[in-house]
Amino acid sequence: MSSAPQQTTLWYDGQDNCLKVIDQTRLPFEVEVLALNTLEQAADAIVSMKVRGAPLIGITAAFGVYLSVRTDSGSLRYACESLLRTRPTAVNLRWALDRMYNSLKDLPEQQLAPAALELAQRLLAEDAAACGAIGDFGLDILTKLYQQKRELQGQDTVLNILTHCNAGWLATGAWGTALAPVYKAKLAGLPVHVWVDETRPRNQGASLTAWELAQSSVPHTLITDNAGGHLMQHGQVDICLVGSDRTTSTGDVCNKIGTYLKALAAYDNLIPFYAALPVSTVDFEAADGVSEIPIEERAADEVTHVQGIDDAGQLRRVQTSHPGTRVSNYGFDVTPARLVTGLITELGVFPATVQGLLSLKIQIR
Ligand code: MRU
């Protein structure tokens, strides 16, 4: 069972009457908390990726709706429409805004703001609980794998997990999706070690996942994005665990660019490949992930430049390519369902098949 949620990256501050978020563009060098007071600030935080990760984008948008209607009760539709335009791929954004809009649209003016705040708080709490449950279901998988490995290799064995991007508590209400089972494993005393893909171009693995795991003393090793296949060929990866930004009704999993290549390598090496996601990430309207999921294209400077601190401790951006080089920067890719061993959700583990998604849908109702 879930124990108390771990760290959280977003909360409503009732004293200051604003939304507080950790600015993820400053990590891992500074933990800076931002106060968001307006719709525009909430939308900007999503666009500029001060907050990111599929569930967190949806939760931030829900609070953004509140920040808008508390000063302008006629702005519900405008707020939802403008927040929906902030990022295209993670379906949790649409899911959260639909919930806000449908619950609020018929309320009398004086009830709108308190109801919006209450619902946004509820979405945050629900996501935290969902991720805790994902952690519990994922822990069962990790425990079985560990027991099998220990029978073959003895007491000192460690379970090696490979993850891509950041699908930890920074990306959700609490716990994370792909990292929730890892945190639960750590709490349960299971010896785990995480291979952290650095996740170019924005380095969510290097700057966020490695930092998160260090906060909880989970053993981990940062690797380049191209290293996973080699490690898998050499028996150094027991399971791949990733999050998802949108999963279709057929089980295709859209996640951070590069996930597909990890799934191909895992398939070739007979390594289980799981996606962990709350049901808010499932797009039951989409069937074929490759043709139907909008893939975000981001600015060229994310590829041509890198950010880090220099030897004097100053945060700097430096250019790594010839000026004027043509750039393509797709943010996500789609892993076809046939490469996915299973989907770990808050309602259990489901096969990444039409049948599996149907049984999930039945459980939701
Ligand atoms: O572009 P980002 O950083 O928002 O992308 C995040 C991811 O791809 C995560 O893996 C995904 O949102 C799942 S997070 C729980």
Image (cartoon, rainbow, N blue to C red):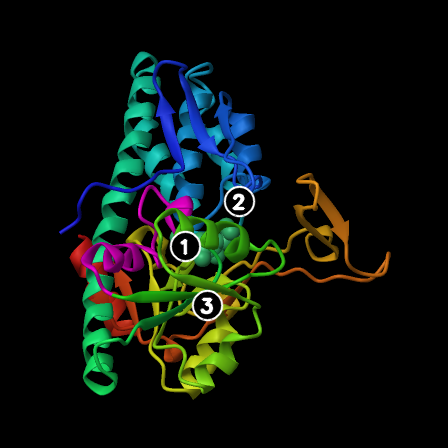
Lateral position of residue 249 relative to residue 206, left or right: left
Q: Which residues are magenta?
A: 168-190
User: Pointer 1: what residue?
Assistant: 167
User: Can the viewer see residue 140?
Assistant: yes
Calculate the distance from the C-alpha at mark 3 to the C-alpha at mark 1: 20 Å
Calculate the distance from the C-alpha at mark 2 to the C-alpha at mark 1: 15 Å
Calculate the distance from the C-alpha at mark 2 to the C-alpha at mark 3: 33 Å
Residue 134 at x, y percent in the picture? 25, 56
Disc 1 residue: CB within 8 Å of ligand 1: yes
- Judge whether residue 254 is colored magenta: no
Question: What amino acid type should be assigned to the residue bearing mark 1?
Answer: Ala
N-term mark: 3 or 1: 1
**Mark 2 against mark 3, which lies toward the viewer?**
2
Closer to us: 16 or 284: 16
Question: What amino acid type should be assigned to the residue bearing mark 3?
Answer: Gly
Residue at 55%, 27% in the rendered image? 41
Q: Secondary structure at mark 1?
A: loop
User: Pointer 3: what residue?
Assistant: 289
Q: Secondary structure at mark 3?
A: helix
N-term mark: 2 or 1: 2
Q: Secondary structure at mark 2?
A: loop
Question: What amino acid type should be assigned to the residue bearing mark 2?
Answer: Pro
Residue 298 at x, y percent in the picture? 65, 52
Q: Residues within 10 Å of mark 3 (few under 14, many from 20)?
A: many
Say if 63 sits above or below 110 in the image: below
- Judge whether residue 181 is colored magenta: yes
User: Pointer 2: what residue?
Assistant: 28
Q: Residues within 10 Å of mark 2 (few under 14, many from 20)?
A: some
